[in-house]
Amino acid sequence: MTSSLVNFWERIAASRSYSSQGAADRARLALRAAREIADRDSSSGAERRKALIQQLYEAYGLEQELNAGPEIASGAAQGISTSVSLVTACRNRNENLKRALPSWIACPQITEIVIVDWTSEIPVAEDLAGSGISDHRIRVVRVDDEPRWILSYAFNLGFQSAKCARILKADADIVIEPDFFNRNLLRPKAFIAGNWRTAARHQAFVNGFFYVKRAPLIELGGFNEYITTYGWDDEELYARLIEHGLVREDVAGGSIHHLPHNDAERTERASNRTGAAAAETLPGQTSYLIRRNRQIANMMPTWSGTRPRVGYEPLPSHRDSSRLRRIARSGGKVPNAISHEADLAAARELMSWRLGDECYALELVQVEHLIQTHSWEALKLTHVREVLGDSPATGVLGLRADRQRLFVDAQHGLGNRLRAIGSAAAAAAAEDRDLVIIWRPDHHCDCRFDDLFDYDGEVRDDLDPESAARDGAVVFNYMEIEPGAEKNAPVWFEPDRDVYFRSAFVINHKASHWDAENRFLKSLVPTEAVEDLVGSVRSPNDVAAHVRMAGGPQFEHLAWENKSNWTDEAHSAVSHWRRESHYERFLTRLSELFETGAAETVFVAADLPETYEMFTARFGSRAAHLSRQVNDRSREQLQYALADAILLSRAPRLLGSSWSSFSELAMRLAGSGLKVEMTGKDF
């Protein structure tokens, strides 16, 4: 039987399994995949297989998708209108708007383009007309007399003005590619959104783009109108859509892109003044504004379509809805007390990022004192400790001088970071050093250490090799893609100097060996959130499988899979071993184990959602996995990943992916006697 025919029957089996579980959406997707295989098949049995697909559509009670283009077929299958309203809003962003508009006009699937002009100095309608941009689908709604940009107000007006069943929300700087609708099919009970965590380099601002049915968007009240400054508006809305029962799906890579401009344009704030008090300069930082708005959203009532909304009235000279003015006293208001509390809580959070978790012990009144009496650049941990009544003697890098330290600056993904930390812990213990973990959230690992572990040791995110060297530490850098780095250089310790170790790999030191490294990792206590995930899945299973497939050119738009993370040699090795770790290898090996009675159950951890579907289709309830709605490097996903590693480690046999630090992590967490088989080597 050819591989394509095997794939066809696997998808038919998957559709039956999903239909029996009541998962109509997934059954439809499986049938669609089977149809695509049948369409490419020129053998004599192809027509019989197509007829079978049609019979299964009828048997499952699904509407037909056959004989239609991909976008129309998707709409018909979902029982929704194929009409789309593109909604945008802008204030003095006309030039970007005029650059993006042609890409919107070029999409025949877009029925109307609603533009909310939020008191632009040059009215948008006049500017478009003067530039010769005209299309019958364009409808401009202008709001006059607005002193500043408020995204939530402007876009909510656009959503209310839209007439179509589906809404495509795009900022004025978003360009839509011609194949967007073919590559982004809006499924039932789902919405499509940009994701800064998985976006290509320099495309993080696509996070605010989304494609959703109008009904749930209006029911939830659109953007949270308690948020009236830059930041967190999109993530807050996405969280409510998910809570409403929708699944977030990432926009297809390369199907949209944003036109570049700086944060000052977005926030309408000037850059910070050096030396000014932090209370004065913090509102110019986008990271502060985002955290402040998150605090406000958490403290105020949950936003929905029933909350007090901003209202509008036509200008006296324009009786239609094309020229409006906001009704002054309309809408919900954030009390001054909550706004002030959010200001200080956000400042404390950012302070902790720079100076450590000791900052969380500060009362808000103490935070206020610190940011009013110190500039952000000059604020130090000693100032925090003075306010808290604890001012110990400090040594290099702002720490106690009684013992020297080994700083481990852990790099790349979860498996790589924990490997480096465990190795450094073994060396620190042997050298009688305090271990200080440097853990910075980034595109590889967008979470904090305390999101994963309840850890009493010191964790910081404010040090780097340059500052460590300036403060007298001996620096060893194993990240060979960085200038001056030397992977695997022997690490030595001077009696009166700290050591700073930057790495995704084990330290070259005599005390660092497998058992010593793993003793520290096994001593780490997962957070309650991680433990809850572990407890939600059957374990232990007879065998565990870690399937690491995502890699190579088709995944390099993801920041953590981009070839810039490795040397050319390492990148070639990664691509090779990802191909060797295809789920088909695991399915074949597991079938052998099940058929011979060597195993009855399997726990699966994978980096692609379709892998879980294939295991479920082949093995049904014998295959367990942690069900999730996220597949990125966010805090939530990293908690799932740690839970996956723990569950993988509990089986007596592990089928691992070669050249994967995550498979290695599962081995490190496992007890003695683990049987390990690796792709491309053992099966």
Image (spheres, helix red, strand yellow):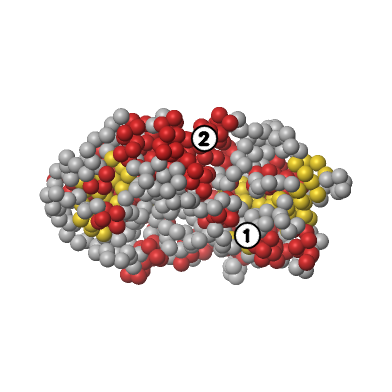
Residue 108 coordinates in the image, percent (x, y):
74, 63
Residue 47 coordinates in the image, percent (x, y):
64, 64
> Looking at the picture, which amino acid does disc 2 mark?
Ala
**Residue occupied by mark 1:** 173
300 and 10: which one is in front?
300
**Residue occupied by mark 2:** 342
> Looking at the picture, which amino acid does disc 1 mark?
Asp
Quadrant in which residue 568 is drawn:
bottom left
* Residue depicted at x 74% and y 46%: 145
425 and 514: which one is in front?
425
| Picture layout, residue 160 above or below residue 55 | above
500 and 283: which one is in front?
283
Residue 313 coordinates in the image, percent (x, y):
81, 41
| Precedes in sequence: disc 1 or disc 2 | 1
Q: Residues within 10 Å of mark 1 (few under 14, many from 20)?
A: many
* Residue depicted at x 44% and y 51%: 274
| Picture layout, residue 680 above or below residue 327 | below
Between the C-alphas of marks 1 and 2, the distance is: 30 Å
The reply to whether residue 77 is in sight is no
- Relative to 261, 401 lies left or right: left
404 and 621: which one is in front?
404
Q: Residues within 10 Å of mark 2 (few under 14, many from 20)?
A: many
* Residue depicted at x 81% and y 61%: 136
Which quadrant of the figure contains the C terminus?
A: bottom left
* Residue depicted at x 78% and y 61%: 126
